[in-house]
Image (tube, rainbow, N blue to C red):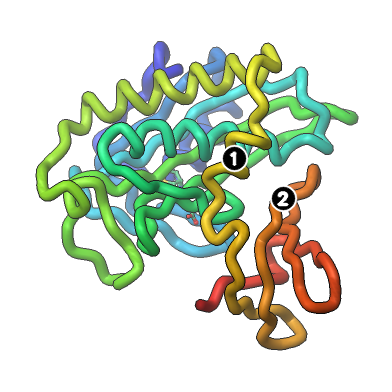
């Protein structure tokens, strides 16, 4: 990962730039697009991703997971989440993944992942894995955000972190491709709020439930007084 590196001083979104480059060039698997300044970073659910210039990692990796059935697309989410968790966990204890792929330390978000897949027939053909990891930014507009430096009270070298992230993603990706590791078990073991009763917002209103896991379609499985229910990203929010 990152052997071929496209590094630009500024761009709108590394995910978008990588997709645009792919329309004009053939790029090898593992190509990474990185910038210190994203002007229109994109998040999940149509949200924006803001990051102070020069402080954090904003990077997109190109994968060709043609071995994976489209129905197994959630495994990319698990694989990428684990790679970011590996990276963060080398610096801070207690990092967790909040389904589907927010990386939290305590109750604060340190990293987000935006995965954009392409499918050909029944298989995946391409995935752009965009990672925003808060590193040296210490003031945030959102009270629910944090960074590595904020948690360990020390600046972290971006270059070192970038190399660690690329190496972890490569290891997790190869493990997945060779089916050497059980992604689902590793992901479940680090799942935020798993096995605890909490309050959620659903389309029908507030709901008490306990996260049990994630099904093969990537839906969140929540035990409630009425039995186990399954939710997609648009259908549930975490409250308290
Ligand atoms: C989220 O938590 O909603 C996902 C955030 C993903 C942000 C990263 S930063 C690099 C890449 N380029 C983007 O425009 N988004 C992702």
| Horizontal side, residue 224 vs residue 64: left or right | right
| Horizontal side, residue 92 vs residue 75: left or right | left
Marks 2 and 1 sit apart, C-alpha to C-alpha, by: 9 Å
The quarter holding residue 211 reads: bottom right
Is 16 drawn above or below residue 173 in the view shown?
A: below
Is 114 drawn above or below residue 40 in the view shown?
A: above
Disc nearer the start of the sequence (2/1): 1
**Which residue is pictured at 58% across the width and 32% down the height?**
79
Q: Residues within 10 Å of mark 2 (few under 14, many from 20)?
A: many
Label 1 lies in ligand 1 vicinity (Cβ under 8 Å): no
Residue 40 picture location, percent across and down: 40, 55
Instruction: Decide if residue 24 is in sight here.
Output: no
Residue 223 picture location, percent across and down: 75, 67
The quarter holding residue 184 reads: top right
Residue 91 picture location, percent across and down: 26, 37
| Horizontal side, residue 149 vs residue 5: left or right | left
**Most extreme residue toward the right, as rendered?**
121
Helix, strand or loop for disc 2: strand
Quadrant of the drawing holding the N terminus: top left
> Label 2 belongs to which residue?
214
> Label 1 belongs to which residue?
187
């Amino acid at each position: 990962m990152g052997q071929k590196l496209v590094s630009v001083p500024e761009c709108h979104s590394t995910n978008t730039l990588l997709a645009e480059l792919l329309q004009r060039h053939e790029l090898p698997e593992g190509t990474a697009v990185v910038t210190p300044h994203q002007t229109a970073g994109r998040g999940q659910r149509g949200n924006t991703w803001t990051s102070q210039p020069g402080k954090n990692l904003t990077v997109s990796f190109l994968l060709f997971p043609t071995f994976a059935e489209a129905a197994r697309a959630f495994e990319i989410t698990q694989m990428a989440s684990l790679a970011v968790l590996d990276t963060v966990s080398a610096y801070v204890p207690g990092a967790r993944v909040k389904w589907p792929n927010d990386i939290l330390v305590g109750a604060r978000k340190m990293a987000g992942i935006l995965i954009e897949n392409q499918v050909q027939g029944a298989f995946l053909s391409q995935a752009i894995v965009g990672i925003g990891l808060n590193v040296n930014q210490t003031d945030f507009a959102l009270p629910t955000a944090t960074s590595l430096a904020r948690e360990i009270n020390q600046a972290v070298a971006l270059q070192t972190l970038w190399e660690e992230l690329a190496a972890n993603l490569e290891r997790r990706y190869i493990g997945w491709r060779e089916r050497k590791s059980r992604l689902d078990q590793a992901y479940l073991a680090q799942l935020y709020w798993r096995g605890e009763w909490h309050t959620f917002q659903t389309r029908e209103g507030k709901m008490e439930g306990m996260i049990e896991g994630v099904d093969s379609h990537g839906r969140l499985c929540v035990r409630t007084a009425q039995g186990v229910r399954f939710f997609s990203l648009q259908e549930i929010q975490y409250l308290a």
